[in-house]
Amino acid sequence: MSQKDRDSLLHFIDAMMLAASKREFDVLLFWKLDRLSREGVRRTLVHLTQLDGWGVRWRSFQEPFFDSCGVMRDVVISIMATLAEQERINISDRTKAGLQRARRAGQRLGRAPIQIDMKTFRQMRAKGHSLRDVAEALGCSASLLVKRERLD
């Protein structure tokens, strides 16, 4: 998961917890505990404890046994959260190893570079063509043209 995706997810969790604290919903239904949080045992338990404190019930769609764990519920949740955190680490390690293997094999990673004819770009813009029209004519995105223009 990229840093941008992680930041976006954390922002979503923060917004969800704020809404829960205001009692904007009564029940939080998540697919599985590892989909709620892969931040580790402590953070997962903090989230669930806060929800309980605010009177917001929570349910795992794929793990209905949480409802029948009784006094052992926190222990089961701790184990499940630990497994989820370890899986996140394993996925990250496998992804990094795969990228490293591909680099060693000489594979080029990422999108192929796009050659932009900046002379044509400037001529079309001088004739009043929109950025979107120029981008379409040159076979690239308008945002790429803006970035490239800043470099020139």
Image (cartoon, grey):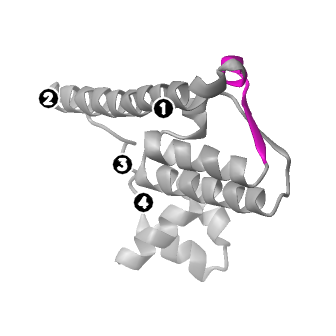
Image coordinates for residue 47, horizontal then vertical, percent: 60, 48
**Hey, which residue is sitting farthest front in the picture?**
71
Could you tell me which secondary element the residue under label 1 belongs to? helix
Labels 1 and 3: the sequence-earlier one: 1
Q: In the rendering, which numbered label is found on residue 116?
A: 4
Q: Who's the residue at 66% across and 73% down the image? A: 129
Q: Which three-letter amino acid code belongs to the residue tagged 1?
A: Ser
| Residue type at numbered disc 2 | Arg
Q: Which residue is mark 2?
A: 104
Q: Earlier in the sequence, mark 2 or mark 4?
A: 2
- Amino acid type of the residue tagged 3 in the rendering: Pro
Q: Reading the chain from its start, which is encountered first: label 1 or label 4?
A: 1
Residue positioned 27% across, 26% down in the render: 98
Image location of residue 102, percent across then percent down: 23, 27
* Cα distance in 3D space between marks 1 and 3: 46 Å
Q: Which residue is mark 1?
A: 78
Of residues 46 and 40, the one drawn nearer to the viewer in this rendering? 46
User: Going 26% across and 32% down the picture, which residue do you hit?
Assistant: 99
Residue 113's tag is: 3
Circle nearer the N terminus (3, 2): 2
Q: CA distance from mark 2 to mark 4?
A: 29 Å
**Amino acid beneath label 4:** Ile
Mark 3 against mark 4, which lies toward the viewer?
3
SS at mark 4?
A: loop
In front: label 1 or label 4:
1
Reply yes or no: does residue 57 show up in magenta: yes
The part of the chain drawn in magenta is 56-67
